[in-house]
Amino acid sequence: MTESDIDDILLKICSLRHSDEVNKFSFAESDCLLIAQRAASQGVAAWALNQLNLFYTDNESLVPLRQSLKGLSLASLADSQRKCSVFFKIVKILSDSEIRVSALKGIAMMMGYYPDISFRTVGDIDLLVAHADAYRAHSILLQHFPQEMRHKARTNILSETIRTHLPGLMIDDVLVELHYNIYSADNSKRLKDGFEQHIKTFGEGERAFSAFDEPLMLYHLATHAVKSRRQKGLRLNWLTDFFAILNVEPEMAADFCANALKINEKANKDIVGFLQRVVSLLPENISSAICKNLNISEIILDKAYLLNTHEGTKTGRFRKVRALNSIIRGMSRELKKQKGLSAKWHHLKDMLHDIATRKR
């Protein structure tokens, strides 16, 4: 069974437009393990297990797959609980200094939009603070969690190229990034303000936190997904993020999408193109409402539109790295003339090599 075959299977299982084909699946025990491992690497092990338990219970041949997914789902739950603990620790520290922080991206989806935190795995923790508070917040966290110099040097260079967040911090073995605006497909779609009206509160008491509302979350997900798809392909949990937001009443889902298109017209082409494909995996009543409201047609999702192979993207990354190197060589003589910058130059070359060879 190839990786492509497994992705086809997982797409059918994870989709909210339920397929009779799933009830006909039958796998060898060794294949069940491969499917479960791929689901875990794509961040959808717990989601896939929940789908099987809710909608595909008639197929007894799927029991071994459920068992394989169960152990990985428990591991996902433990990791999600650890990430939540780190998140609330940071919120407490910054709140004590009167700095408001909002959850961003994966951690916001996991805690705010999924019915269970195990359904959404999180790699790093992304947080949003006001630009005026960003450097002070970063300094406060550095005082609480001193960093190794090598890590600081590399992340300084990386964040300077992105210009949306400060250097990442390792806190309790979790990478944490403080953002002061949100990154999307290109500069014209990068929002620098206007967040406040789209931030809402989730949870209660000590577990209360703030994050984007549905329209801005859709905007951020769609524009970020388009950028990521072009660069290296998407993990399947990008799709389940959309499911988690849009799997509501049809009219609410349609309104969320319509309001997302009002945020920044320059991004609408990207958002609509992505939605046209994503809705094909939603229940038909929700898909129909969205398409009617936006006056668009549904496009059947082509797996190749989302999931690029590592080998294909590695070639693209090397091409981009060569272009970057040609620019940097023009600066290298001046850099080497200035005392103390040669080490930073070598760090930059190391980082470029990592970007070219890293397997995500």
Image (cartoon, rainbow, N blue to C red):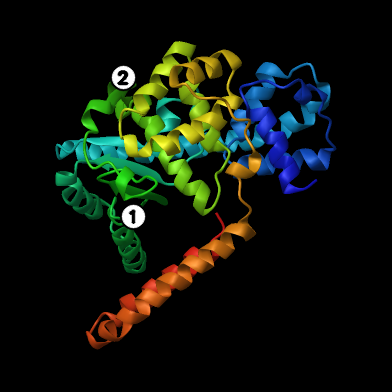
**Disc 2 and disc 1: Cα gap in Å?**
28 Å
Of discs 2 and 1, which sits in the foreground? Answer: 1
Please identify the quarter of the rendering in which residue 287 is found. Answer: top right
Q: Nearer the viewer, residue 154 or 143?
A: 154
From this view, report whether residue 130 is shown above or below residue 15. below
From this view, report whether residue 116 is shown above or below residue 148. above
Sequence-earlier tag: 2 or 1: 1
In the image, which disc is placed on residue 128?
none
Viewer can see residue 238: yes
Label 2: which secondary element:
loop
- Residue 108 x, y percent position in the rendering: 39, 33
State the residue at coordinates (58%, 38%): 236
Q: Amino acid at mark 1?
A: Gly
State the residue at coordinates (33%, 43%): 189
Left or right of 24 in this view: 243: left
From this view, report whether residue 308 is shown above or below residue 149. above
Q: Nearer the viewer, residue 75 or 344?
A: 344
State the residue at coordinates (57%, 62%): 314
Viewer can see residue 106: no
Q: Mark 2, residues whose alpha carbon is within 10 Å: few (<14), some, or many (≥20)? A: few
| Residue tagged 1 | 168
Q: Quadrant of the C terminus?
A: bottom right
Q: Mark 1, residues whose alpha carbon is within 10 Å: few (<14), some, or many (≥20)? A: many
Left or right of 297 in this view: 26: right
State the residue at coordinates (59%, 17%): 283
- Residue 50 x, y percent position in the rendering: 63, 24
Please identify the quarter of the rendering in which residue 304 is found. Answer: top right
In the image, which disc is placed on residue 204?
2
Left or right of 148 in this view: 298: right
Q: Amino acid at mark 2?
A: Glu
